[in-house]
Amino acid sequence: MMMGRMRVALSVTCVNDAMYPDTGKAVVALLRRLGVDVEFPEAQTCCAQPMVNTGYLDEAVPVVRTFVDAFAGYDAIVTPSGSCAGSARHQHSLVARRSGDPGLERAVAETSPKVYELSEFLVDVLGVTDVGAYFPHRVTYHPTCHSLRLLGVGDRPRRLLEAVRGIRLTDLPAAEECCGFGGTFAVKNADTSVAMGADKARHVRETGAEVLVAGDNSCLMHIGGMLSRQRSGVRVMHLAEILAATE
């Protein structure tokens, strides 16, 4: 299998590193089960998205430099986040151009196209939709904004979920509406963010699902916080954790 020779790195993301380490572990377990020898470059830090989204483009330059240095030489960089994959693929070039450093521009042009959100890597690079998972629960899927709009992951996460044995997948009403987290948006526009989150939580409860799944833990943290305060009994889980689950 060619994948064994492919050099693959995990970009775990800040949110997962700090708060959801099990998601990173699930990605590694899943990829190893599929025959991928995944590495974790210790030098990695942030993807720079918080700086870019808040307008601190100059401050983002050293962060992007660290990113391209940490992930240089890999054939693919897999991240369990549509948000961070979107940043690497679309924002890094803006930051590099602004830096006026042609070396950084070249490094970004080399690295950015190799960054894949988990579902993209599984479906497009490995060519699998059935990853051998087993998860006998009623589940609903929330497509996060960046995965949907910035990356265009389309139905890839859904195709992966549909192939999971024992799963009962239920459609989420108004699925494509934003959950309201948006990183710094939730801090700057708290009331709007909470109102959007409340709508999303209500739609999740309407499905009768036991578990809400998404490809970004930042969004799940926001919706999950609401669901737990409402004593809804709905758990949130990252896509990687469901796909890593076996009998």
Image (tube, rainbow, N blue to C red):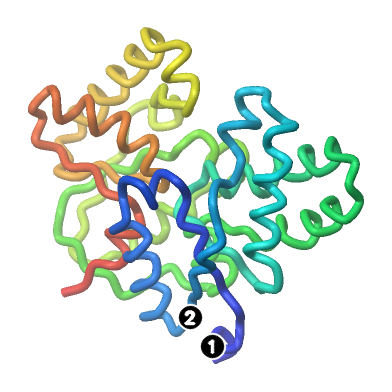
Which numbered circle lies on residue 241?
none
Q: In this view, does 40 lie above or below 137?
A: below
Residue ID at (59%, 37%): 49
Tell me residue 247's x, y (percent): 16, 74
Tell me residue 76's x, y (percent): 62, 69
Q: Mark 2 points at which residue?
A: 36
Tell me residue 133's x, y (percent): 27, 70
Q: Viewed as shown, does residue 11 lie left or right of 166?
A: right
Mark 2 lies on a secondary structure that is loop
Tell me residue 246's x, y (percent): 21, 72
Q: Label 2 is placed on what type of residue? A: Val
Q: Counting other residues with Cα less than 10 Å from the Cα at mark 1, is it few (<14), some (14-19), or many (20 or more)?
A: few
CA distance for labels 2 and 1? 5 Å
Is the Cβ of the residue at disc 2 closer than 8 Å to that at disc 1? yes
Of all residues shown, which one is farthest toward the top?
A: 191
Q: Viewed as shown, does residue 138 lie left or right of 42?
A: left
Q: Name the residue under label 1.
A: 4
Residue ID at (14%, 36%): 208
